[in-house]
Amino acid sequence: MKTYMTAGAALLMTTTIAAAGGLDRSGQSIGAIFEDGDYAELSFGSVSPNVSSAALGGANMAPSYTQFGLGYRKQINDSIAFALIFDQPFGADVAYVGLPIAGIVDSASVTALGQYQVNENVSVHAGLRYLETSGELTLGAFSNTYEPGTGTGYVFGAAYERPDIALRVALTYSSAIDIEHDGIDLPTTLSAAFPQSVNLDFQTGVAADTLVFGSIRWAEWSQASLTDSSPVGQFYAPDNDAFTYNIGVGRRFSETFSGSVSIGYEQAQGGLASAFAPSDGNISLQLGGAYTMDNGVEISGGVRYIRVGDATADFTAFNAGTPTFADNSAIGIGLKVGYTY
């Protein structure tokens, strides 16, 4: 089923900052599997956060970062399709001015996914996900760089579609993945536990050339952690799961151009935040658009403004008390090129 604005509507729905929803960055979308026929896509995103605390001097502790994604779908026959999806699902980049606290988490993931069309309306999908992560950590006198580590997980779900009204509801589960990293500078081991999650994506036509779309993502960050085998121990362990919501409206203005507007929301949880994620919830507004060419190429893009939720963070181990991070924000931009052939 071809939607009215495919990538243009949803391109930035999961563009966020590292501190929102744990270390979530990509949202682990599998949207490429729902494209028509043979399809390939390339996406790029850039996020510029501004996250600071007046009590810590007001310097931004969250540098800008970029995101890349690739997707490939092959229609094997009338009932079976296959997709390969590359994304960067988790990440963090933290650097405090005047405090010995810094950290980087990088990730890259490849998901191999199969889809079986049960009938005109129902399909199922399942596959394997390979995840590679690496990182750096400075906490006080402790400083270490870690070798890349790898882990595997699985993905499965189902979708219900009605092409006549552009309706699709897709539910996808992704398993937790645990990874071990050997230290380079010091002989320690970093154990990383990344959470299981469930994505619910939906869209439906509500009028001629008009589409309502959205998503709900649950990620079990309360069971995720970063732990070093040294006396540093467990230095990142969120207390709560993350629920992230997006809803928007898309409109096709002509045979070649469509636009969309959407809002996102993640509920604040309260309590003390980690120095590696000093925010609590967020709300965002996104504008997007897509231009479709006659040769099967669609170029889409958008911009998203994110209001980062205020948080009180725990810096007692560094004699800095519990500073408040307030009035923070981020800007995300994205571009995607899709080709149906």
Image: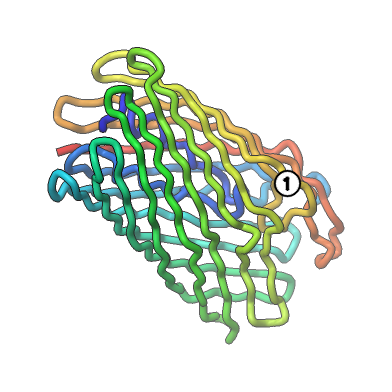
Secondary-structure class at tag 1: loop
336 versus 136 height, above or below = above
Q: Give 158 or 31, whichever is nearer the viewer.
A: 158
- Could you say where residue 122 lies in the image, as x and y percent from the top left? 30, 41
**In this rendering, position of residue 322 left or right of residue 79:** right
Residue sitting at the far bottom: 187
Q: Quadrant of the N terminus?
A: top left
Q: Crowding near pointer 1: few (<14 within 10 Å), some, many (20+)? A: some
Q: Give 293 or 131, whichever is nearer the viewer.
A: 131
291 versus 186 height, above or below = above
Occupied quadrant, residue 136: bottom right
**In this rendering, position of residue 174 left or right of residue 139:** left
Check disc 1 and give the amino acid type: Gln
- Could you say where residue 337 lies in the image, as x and y percent from the top left? 28, 37
8 versus 40 height, above or below = above
**In this rendering, position of residue 79 left or right of residue 337:** left
| Residue underneath mark 1 | 269
16 versus 291 height, above or below = below
Q: Describe the colour scheme in one phrase.
A: rainbow
Residue beneath the point at 24% across and 36% down? 120
Q: Is residue 57 visible?
A: no
Residue beneath the point at 47% across and 32% down? 214
**In this rendering, position of residue 181 left or right of residue 296:** right
Q: Give 123 or 57, whichever is nearer the viewer.
A: 123
Q: Give 280 or 316, whichever is nearer the viewer.
A: 280
- Could you say where residue 202 lies in the image, as x and y percent from the top left? 43, 34
Q: Is residue 183 visible?
A: yes
Counting labels gives 1
- Could you say where residue 247 lies in the image, as x and y percent from the top left? 51, 29
Q: Quadrant of the C terminus?
A: top left
